[in-house]
Image: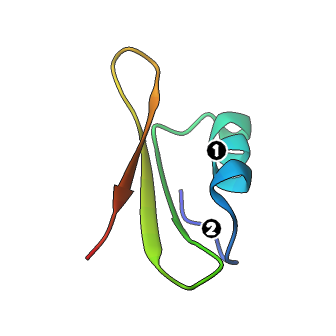
Amino acid sequence: SVALRPMTLEEAIKEAHFRDRDVFVFRDPKGKLMVLHRTREGKMELIEAP
């Protein structure tokens, strides 16, 4: 799933949980591309795109 508007990490985590997504792509408030990935253990992992 991809967010259309910039959001904080906390907002992105809530949105990923709400949408029940294993991968969620968003831009932080500074415009940096970020990816949230749910691990097999169920934890959310943050990946910063270059």
Q: Residue furthest left?
A: 50
Residue located beneath label 1 in the image: 13
- At label 1, counting other C-alpha atoms closer than 10 Å, the crowd grade (few under 14, some 14-19, many 20 or more) is some
In-image side of 17 versus 2 (left or right): right
Q: Nearer the viewer, residue 43 or 20?
A: 43
For label 2, the SS is loop
* Residue that appears at 42% across and 58% down: 35
**Measuring 62% from the left and 43% from the top, which residue is drawn there?**
16
Per the image, the residue denoted by label 2 is 3
* Quadrant (top left, top right, bottom left, bottom right) of the C terminus: bottom left
Quadrant of the rendered image containing residue 19: top right
Front disc: 1 or 2: 1
Residue extending farthest top: 41
Q: Residue at x 70, y 49 (%)?
A: 10
Q: Is residue 12 above or below residue 8?
A: above
**Residue 36, x across and y down, in percent:** 46, 49
Horizontal side, residue 20 vs residue 50: left or right: right
Q: Secondary structure at mark 1?
A: helix
On the image, the x and y values in percent for residue 41 come to: 38, 14
Amino acid type, residue under disc 2 in the picture: Ala
Q: Position of residue 4 (x, y in %)?
A: 66, 76
Q: Nearer the viewer, residue 30 or 26?
A: 30
Question: Which residue does the image show at 54% across and 39% down from the upper left?
Answer: 21
